[in-house]
Amino acid sequence: MTTATVSASTQEALKLSDRINRIEPSATMAVVAEADKLRQQGIDVVDFGAGEPHFATPQHIKDAAIAAIQGNFTKYTAVPGTAELRDAIVHRHAVDFDSDYRREEVIASTGGKNALFNAIQVLVDHGDEVILPVPYWVSFKDIVRYAGGNCVLLEADEAQGFRVTAEMVAELITERTKVIILNSPSNPSGAVMSAEDMTEVVRLAHRRGIWVLSDECYVYLNYTGKNFSVGSLREYKERIVVLGSLSKTYAMTGWRLGYALSPVAITSAMSKLQSQSTSNATSIVQKAAVAALKGPQACVDEMRREYIELRDHVVGGLRSIPGISCTMPQGAFYAYPNISPFLGRGGLKSASDVAGRLLREAHVATVPGEGFGTGEHIRVSYATSKAELDRGLERMRKFFGVL
């Protein structure tokens, strides 16, 4: 029996569900895994792939987790989180964005991705349309597909810095539109929607009975001068779901703590779903999250200032490589250079080819643009030191220089 026959036979025996076959593995996680394999072989990899801060979690947050362990705060909690944590989330958001949420309108989850997954499963049914700007974070499309929804892609204009406007959103609304996804600042492009455009999208959605799902994972890494959350639009909150995360704001990616702010009916539905999947976020992490949200916020400003310096450094370095162009990101910690002039050279047919050979030959980890909905870009995370950026940029310069 051939390997192909065994494989086909095995697949038939497994009979995997249609919903799992609708999605692909995360492109970013695939890059992390491949880079780890090379490191295990003793290869020095410059990692521009990982979407996480290079900073250590602030000490006062770590101390709170240690105190929770020592105090035996290690049992189950209520599914949506402790009252203390939910109140801290509400308080922090109110102070920073002038929102008006109650404890019953917030749920803590095992990371922002978990909150996003729960929200889409609760809101999107088979055949529903979801407007999704391109480029998009890798998980948006697949989570919508898993729920049975159809993504209606909004192609942002690279020449305008991938800016998304209310007019662009309005043109795509149909009778089947159920959700509009906003992600500002954007992963991967770093684009920031204006407060005026976001407000107009929310007003339009409210009039049409459409949900706005706003992923604000990078809301504190907005370099345009003023942070903005649609959660501040109190009169429209009955059609808004705000998704937040402590991962990027407080350098807590591995701690896995995200949240959603939404009307009670949605929060309750998400809690019901979470009760049958992950249940509560880790009790110890919840205590650390309270310390992050209620403690000193100077660390957030310090990290944002350094990211701006790193952004300017990496964009300047990328633009200095002949053939590469790169828009100036207005937030988050990613650059999204266009590598289209190199497609067709040296056997490179796609961004995946470019990223793959960059990793294998130059030992620089990046994420190919196909995972974000574009085929002419790679994502470069600049959440690292200037010295590491320079090492990676030099390797990239040599790699592209011989194509």
Image: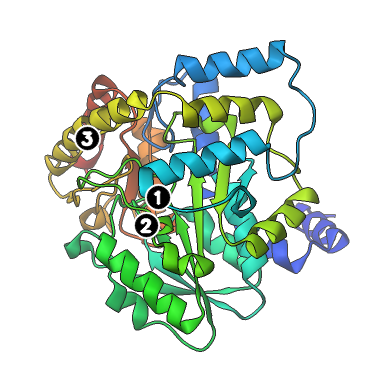
Q: Mark 1–mark 3 contact, CB under 8 Å?
A: no
SS at badge 2? loop
Q: Which mark, residue 308?
A: 3
Where, by quadrant of the figure, is residue 15 drawn?
bottom right
Q: Earlier in the sequence, mark 2 or mark 3?
A: 3
State the separation of the CA atoms marked 1 and 3.
Answer: 23 Å
Residue 116 screen position, x and y as percent = 57, 54
Amino acid type indicated by mark 1:
Pro
Image position of 309 with respect to 202: above or below: above
Residue 49 screen position, x and y as percent = 41, 37
Between residues 207 and 365, which one lies in front from this camera angle? 207
State the separation of the CA atoms marked 2 and 3.
Answer: 30 Å
Amino acid type indicated by mark 3:
Ile
Amino acid type indicated by mark 2:
Ser
State the separation of the CA atoms marked 1 and 2.
Answer: 9 Å
Q: Which residue is mark 2?
A: 350
SS at badge 3? helix
Where, by quadrant of the figure, is residue 76 drawn?
top right
Residue 206 screen position, x and y as percent = 45, 76
| Residue at image point 51% right, 69% down | 239
Q: Which residue is mark 1?
A: 368
